[in-house]
Amino acid sequence: MFKSLVHRLLLWLERQEVRYYMAKMHVGNRVAIERGLRVKKPMNITIGDDVSIGCNVTLEAQAPIYIGDLTPIAPGVIIVTANHDMSKRIRINSPVKIGSNCWLGAGVIVLPGVTIGDGALVGAGSIVTKDLPPEMICVGVPARPLKPRPKS
């Protein structure tokens, strides 16, 4: 019984944390966020309509992060907007833009300054280091366009 009570308390605390993040972010309609969301600087995040965010997603928003409409983000995705310039020993913040109707597979990492074009699909485990074109399936480390996304 004690274990169950502690579990319910932890779930409640996690829901409160997501509510706090959602109150600080610019969130569209019908956005679904699963457990384990981690956010830094939620006021820099804009999420469009009909977006779903899987469990254990990390949004490090030192600079703006924009997620377009109809974009599912699978579990374990990490989106970061800060990097270090080791020669000058300073941090560089660059925004990330994810277009509408994109799809980020499980475990994708999106690095600072990247734009993912509308309709792009990024395969699981890919690391996005440069801009990706619209309507393409992109995979790999670093992520590269593989072929056009099939029309439905």
Image (spheres, helix red, strand yellow):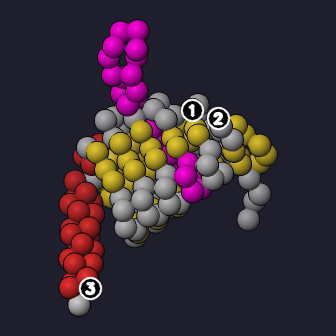
Calculate the distance from the C-alpha at mark 1 to the C-alpha at mark 3.
43 Å
Q: Residues within 10 Å of mark 1 (few under 14, many from 20)?
A: some
Among the 4 quarters of the image, the one containing residue 6: bottom left
Q: Earlier in the sequence, mark 2 or mark 3?
A: 3
Residues at circles 2 and 1 in contact by the CB criterion of under 8 Å: yes
What amino acid is at disc 3? Ser
Q: Earlier in the sequence, mark 2 or mark 1?
A: 1
Stretch of the chain drawn in magenta: 82-108
Among the 4 quarters of the image, the one containing residue 34: bottom left
- Residue drawn at (26%, 85%) of the image: 4
- Residue drawn at (37%, 67%) of the image: 35
Give the mark count: 3
Q: Quadrant of the N terminus?
A: bottom left
Residue behind mark 3: 4
SS type, badge 3: helix
Residue behind mark 2: 142
